[in-house]
Image (tube, coloured by chain):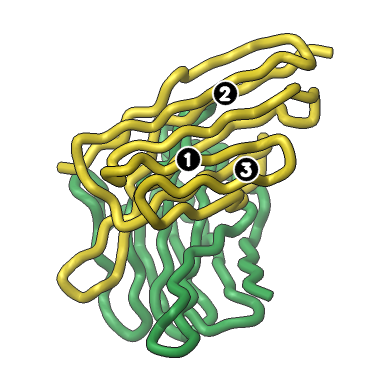
Chain colours: A yellow, B green
Amino acid sequence: TQLLEQSPQFLSIQEGENLTVYCNSSSVFSSLQWYRQEPGEGPVLLVTVVTGGEVKKLKRLTFQFGDARKDSSLHITAAQPGDTGLYLCAGRAFDMDSNYQLIWGAGTKLIIKP
Amino acid sequence: GAVVSQHPSWVICKSGTSVKIECRSLDFQATTMFWYRQFPKQSLMLMATSNEGSKATYEQGVEKDKFLINHASLTLSTLTVTSAHPEDSSFYICSARRIGGLAGTYNEQFFGPGTRLTVL
């Protein structure tokens, strides 16, 4: 069974601070996705990282895929109240038919206080 | 493009009744759709994989007779919660897989907005 451990599960910080969320696994994923979910809504895809060591930036958000494609991190610089939400990582694992399932992390509830 | 809708967005029902939730891919065809359940402040839990024209594949521990899935067309999958009980109250989210491009260069899941089910 593939597991994806996400930490921290809850984080409350002041506006302007930096933070990092981690997703770790003992399994190798073909790619890894990060989602953000607002209360009462479905998750929205932020980014997909595919290559080991890949770094992608989305404004103040920096996503990194580990060299071995077993772990990933999300770093937010100068967090804003608008960044508040549930952040989910999901690793893609392919089955025999070349279709993939998403292995989900537990989620990180992020609160940015003004 | 790649929009997935769910209907209803929220529903309240009495214990013992059945509730149907629809998931539609609005601008693409989806041979595969997924149904998830999410409890407050928790991650998504995959319930079943819905394949157009065939039976759904249920995850371990999910009762197929309680959560009926029908995927009769390439743009619609339905989840029916039969004989609902208060413990079935949850946030149900569907996603649809879009495959396309040259040699299947993209293979993405797009999520619906979710349906909040409350069983009294």
| Residue A109: assigned label | 2
Assign a secondary structure to mark 2.
strand
Disc 3: CA contacts within 10 A as few (<14), some (14-19) or many (>=20): few
Quadrant of residue A114 within the rendered picture: top right
- Residue at mark 1: A64
Q: Nearer the viewer, mark 2 or mark 3?
A: 2
Disc 3: host chain? B
- Residue at mark 3: B12
Classify residue A10 as left or right of residue A91. right
Residue A60 at x, y percent in the picture: 71, 35
Q: How many marks?
A: 3
Disc 1: host chain? A
- What amino acid type is highlighted by mark number 3? Ile
Q: Nearer the viewer, mark 1 or mark 3?
A: 1
Disc 2: host chain? A
Q: Earlier in the sequence, mark 2 or mark 1?
A: 1
